[in-house]
Every structure is written in structure tokens, then in C-alpha cells.
């Protein structure tokens, strides 16, 4: 299955279905004209910790009007969240086959301490696409598109579908590529699907691209 163009919201260490969308699309539009939305993948990701699913959240500076454009959202570094996220990643993935292989690139990116959430997330998306061997054309939106206009433009809108609270069929299920792969703690907790792409990369390494495009044309 090939998608012509997908429209995605920015995301922090996005879930696997996010990269499945990128891997199976001819082109990618990344939304930069929206208003910031809390409790979404824009500031959080899910990894597989020793006790099961663990959410990592990026603190951002609050806007009392709640109308901040996504490109204007600033990261709050008052707490040592980078160190906390690194320690959580190490506890979750240090024993996986590929974490040490990718760790330096990931840590170097976090240590740059980007001021903008959008810039941080874009860097992560580009890095993970490269590490997974995904060849894609990512462009940024110039205005906020919605409704029938998107259909007329041949764009598949995944901004709200790839969301922690979405209850419908995942994109992995629709593309018929959701299947178990090795996870370190699965013997105790079982397989957890659609975690951060970090989980797939650490466990599958170069085979991640085959997982993402297993049944595509």
C-alpha cells in the first residue's frame, strides 16, 4: 500500500505508526501552522520499561492564553528532564542489540538543548528516518489545511489519528504490518505494539525498515 502524501503533526520520539506513514508515503507534510495541543505525541512518547509502558514527557513553557503556535512553543529546562529521559532509555534498552549503536546520535541531539519544541522534534524525526533507512521528502506546511481541501489536494490527514487518545484502528493495522517483534521485557509483560520508534530501532536495528514496509508494494 502506497500513500501519496501524508500530513503529520510534530511528535517527540514518534510512535512506530508515524514512521510507517512516512515509509509508505510518496511525500510528507509536517504541520507547523497549528496551535499547540497538550497531552499528545507532540510532547510525549511511550517506551517499554521494566514495569511495562512508560511515558516520557518534555516540559514546555506555558502560555496562559493556550493559543501558542506550535513553532513558538519553548522547551522548559528548569528540571533535568534530559538526564531523566536518558536514564529511562538506558534502563529500558541498554540490553537490546542496537541501543549502544544508536545512543551517541540520540544523546548528542538531546544535548543540543534546542529552545523550540518543533525544532527538537523535527531533528528527531529526521534522525530516526535516517537511522531506519527511510528515504522520504519532508516539507513543512505554509498554512493550516483542513477538511475537503485536503481531500482535493490528495493529502491523507493523520494529525489527529496518530494520537495517544485515538481509539480506532491503528495505521499499522490498516497497512497490515502490525506484528510482534522481540522486546526485552515481553516475557514478563507481553508484547506492546506501537511504542516509540526508539523501541523498534533498539530491538530490530537495520531490520526496522523491513518491519515498516513488510506488506507494501
Image (spheres, grey):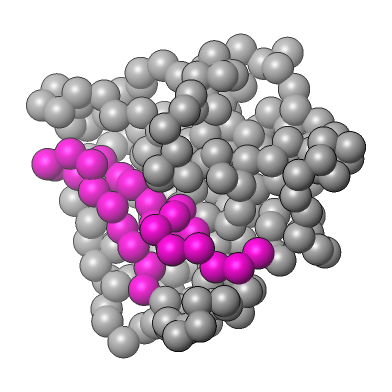
Magenta stretch: residue 54 in it? Answer: yes
Residue 214 image offset from top left, x and y in percent = 58, 16
Task: Quadrant for residue 38, please give it.
Answer: bottom left
92 lies left or right of 57: left
185 lies left or right of 27: left
User: Which residue is found at the position 36% from the left and 21% from the top?
Assistant: 181
Seen from the viewer's position, the closer of residues 10 and 94 is 10
Residue 143 image offset from top left, x and y in percent = 81, 63
Above/below status of 175 relative to 97: above
Residue 124 image offset from top left, x and y in percent = 54, 57
Q: How many marks?
A: 0
Residue 136 image offset from top left, x and y in percent = 74, 41
Task: Quadrant for residue 148, please give it.
Answer: top right
User: Which residue is found at the position 24% from the left and 48% from the top?
Assistant: 54
Magenta stretch: residue 195 in it? Answer: no
Residue 45 visible in image: yes
Q: Specify start and end residues of the magenta stretch as a single range.
A: 34-59
Seen from the viewer's position, the closer of residues 216 and 40 is 40
User: Which residue is found at the position 46% from the left and 19% from the top?
Assistant: 178
54 lies left or right of 132: left
Instruction: Give the position of the C terminus as an image quadrant.
Output: top right
Residue 211 visible in image: no
Above/below status of 46 relative to 65: above
Above/below status of 30 relative to 69: above
Instruction: Give the position of the N terminus as an image quadrant.
Output: top right
Amino acid at each position: 500500500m502506497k500513500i501519496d502524501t501524508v500530513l503529520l503533526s510534530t511528535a517527540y520520539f514518534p510512535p512506530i505508526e508515524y514512521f510507517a506513514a512516512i515509509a509508505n508515503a510518496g511525500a510528507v507534510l509536517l504541520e507547523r501552522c497549528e496551535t499547540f495541543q497538550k497531552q499528545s505525541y507532540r510532547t510525549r512518547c511511550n517506551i517499554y520499561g521494566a514495569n511495562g509502558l512508560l511515558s516520557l514527557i518534555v516540559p514546555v513553557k506555558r502560555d496562559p492564553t493556550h493559543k501558542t503556535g506550535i513553532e513558538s512553543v519553548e522547551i522548559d529546562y528548569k528540571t533535568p528532564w534530559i538526564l531523566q529521559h536518558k536514564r529511562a532509555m538506558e534502563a529500558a534498552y541498554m540490553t537490546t542489540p542496537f541501543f549502544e549503536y544508536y545512543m551517541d546520535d540520540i544523546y548528542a541531539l538531546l544535548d543540543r538543548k534546542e529552545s523550540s519544541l518543533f525544532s527538537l522534534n523535527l531533528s528527531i524525526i529526521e534522525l530516526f528516518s535516517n537511522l531506519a533507512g527511510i528515504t522520504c521528502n519532508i516539507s513543512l506546511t505554509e498554512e493550516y489545511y483542513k477538511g475537503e481541501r485536503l481531500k482535493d489536494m490528495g493529502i491523507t490527514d493523520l494529525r489527529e489519528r496518530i494520537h495517544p487518545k485515538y481509539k480506532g484502528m491503528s495505521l499499522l493495522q490498516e497497512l497490515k504490518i502490525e506484528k510482534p517483534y522481540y522486546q526485552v521485557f515481553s516475557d514478563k509483560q507481553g508484547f506492546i505494539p506501537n511504542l516509540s520508534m526508539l523501541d523498534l530501532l533498539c530491538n530490530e536495528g537495520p531490520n526496522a525498515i523491513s518491519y515498516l514496509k513488510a506488506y507494501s508494494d
